[in-house]
Image (tube, helix red, strand yellow):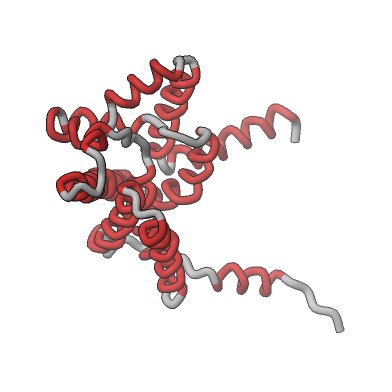
Amino acid sequence: MGVRDRFHLWASAVWTYVRCAPGTFIWLAILLVTTIIARHLSPHELQFVLGNRSTNLHHLREDPIRVLVSSAFWLAGGPWITYALLYNIFHVPAERWLGTLRWVTVCVLAHVGATYLSEGVLYWAIEHDDAPAAATFTLDVGVSYALAGVVAVLTYRIARPWRYVYAAGVVVFFLIPVLTNQTFTDVGHFSAALIGFACYPLTRSRKGVWNPMTVFRARKSTGTSST
């Protein structure tokens, strides 16, 4: 097989992989563009751009739809490549399993629901003098709430009893920061995970439950023995 044939074979495999989760890769492409833009802004300009798209209490009261949409296309921290890896680990299998429409539904429910729940906790803290009034304008952008919801909904992609092990791991991972740090973003991540668990009805008609034991069985069946 020549170099050109190998390249076409590789390109075809990549395209097939991308085409199975179009929403995920369109989202990643937009995040790449906004990340590049962010790198070319001064710290003051970046603070203004992100602040204008923040789902804080002020913007949720004044223009909720705009900030709920725009905040999901900017990264508040961490390199883009890290999110690309996480998207391939969690979003890609979720979209391929649920279908794009149901996957988007989980993302939207987790993003919107966790935003309002976490900001509601912050509002309660402000009203009870447990947080400063300036927190009304706090910076809150990013894709982590949607990611947390998808991480949780993938629980139903795993066969029992491994499903319960995975679910327990998800709960512990998102609950520990709530108990130790007690920030509104930690509350948001945990809330998003709970919303993801609550999306079980969207998964009921989906087939293709993954059983980790099949991996070990496949390896065992292809192994050789000596006599």
Place of residue 109 in the rendered image (x, y in percent of width and height, measured from the top left): 23, 48
Query: In the figure, is residue 18 to the left or right of 121?
Result: right
Decide which of 157, 111 is in the foreground and name it.
111
* Residue 105 visible at all: no
- Which residue ends up furthest to the left in the rendered image? 62
The residue positioned 49% from the left and 20% from the top of the image is 39
The residue positioned 43% from the left and 43% from the top of the image is 20
Q: Quadrant of residue 64?
A: top left
The residue positioned 75% from the left and 36% from the top of the image is 1
| Relative height, residue 213 to residue 43 (above, below) | below
| Relative height, residue 101 to residue 211 (above, below) | above
* Residue 217 visible at all: yes
The image quadrant where one finds the C terminus is bottom right
| Relative height, residue 107 to residue 31 (above, below) | below
Place of residue 81 in the rendered image (x, y in percent of width and height, measured from the top left): 54, 35
Place of residue 173 in the rendered image (x, y in percent of width and height, measured from the top left): 44, 60
Query: In the figure, is residue 196 to the left or right of 121?
Result: right
The residue positioned 43% from the left and 35% from the top of the image is 25
| Relative height, residue 225 to residue 45 (above, below) | below
Decide which of 204, 79 is in the foreground and name it.
79
- Which residue ends up furthest to the right in the rendered image? 227
Q: Quadrant of residue 155?
A: bottom left
